[in-house]
Image (tube, rainbow, N blue to C red):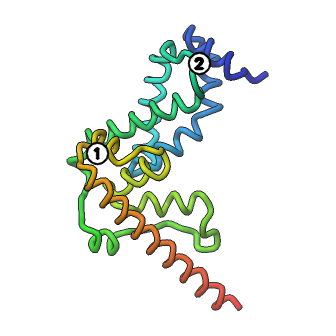
Amino acid sequence: MALSEIEIIEGCKKADKRAQQALFEKYSKRLLGICMRYCQSKDEAEDVLQDGLVKIFFNINQYKGDGSFEGWMKRIIVNTALNNYKSNLKRYYHSDLEDAASEIVSEVNLNDIFEVKDLLNIIQSLPTGYRMVFNMYAIEGYNHKEIGELLNISEGTSKSQLSRARQLLQQKVAELQGEKVAICEINK
């Protein structure tokens, strides 16, 4: 029998392995999806998820029931992903918009354009800085001041990177639409 959210929380507060496993089974896919938006690869995202889950289990006594439990966990996962980004910043390749556009490699199945996995691939193809700002602003709801503080960039840089991310996303979506139409024409 599946544990309720309250049973999972209370069990995890007592370090009950069954409750911890239930938390993992219930939330890990959604939390991994968040990690994937911030990481360069699935392996890196899985590492971030693992680190985030350890933080969740270690800090679960701090959750007082105010607000959504899932929202509380998402905040920990996002912060873990941001810390991972900051610690790996020197490893990430930075390029300007023109270089990025020519280097992007996408594994999108053209027959399934605009499925969630395909949109995730498009977002993941953004240069790291653009992807971080886009995720934080458009998906997580941070404002530019908060983004600037968390990423150690100016508000103006945050706004600029969001604008460039949107432009690049629009370009990639238009390219995929064109490829989809071309494939449909060929298959007629």
Callout 2 environment at 10 Å: few (<14), some (14 to 19), or many (20+)? Answer: few
Residue at coordinates 48% horizontally, 27% vertically from top-left? Answer: 53
- In this rendering, is residue 86 above or below 160? above
**Rendered image quadrant of residue 98:** bottom left
How far across and how far down the image is residue 108, in percent? Answer: 53, 67
Residue under circle 1? 148
Q: Is residue 134 left or right of residue 13?
A: left
* Quadrant where the image shows the C terminus: bottom right
In the rendered view, does 21 fall on the left or right side of 188?
A: left
Q: Residue at x 46, y 71 (%)?
A: 170
Residue identified by numbered label 2: 65
Q: For mark 1, does the 10 Å Cα neighbourhood hold few (<14), some (14 to 19), or many (20 or more) residues?
A: some
Furthest toward the left, the residue is 90
Q: Give the x, y percent position of residue 128.
A: 33, 55
Compared with 164, 120 (above or below) is above
Residue farthest toward the right in the current orientation of the protein: 1
Single out the residue that lies furthest toward the top.
14
Q: Is residue 106 above or below residue 176?
A: above
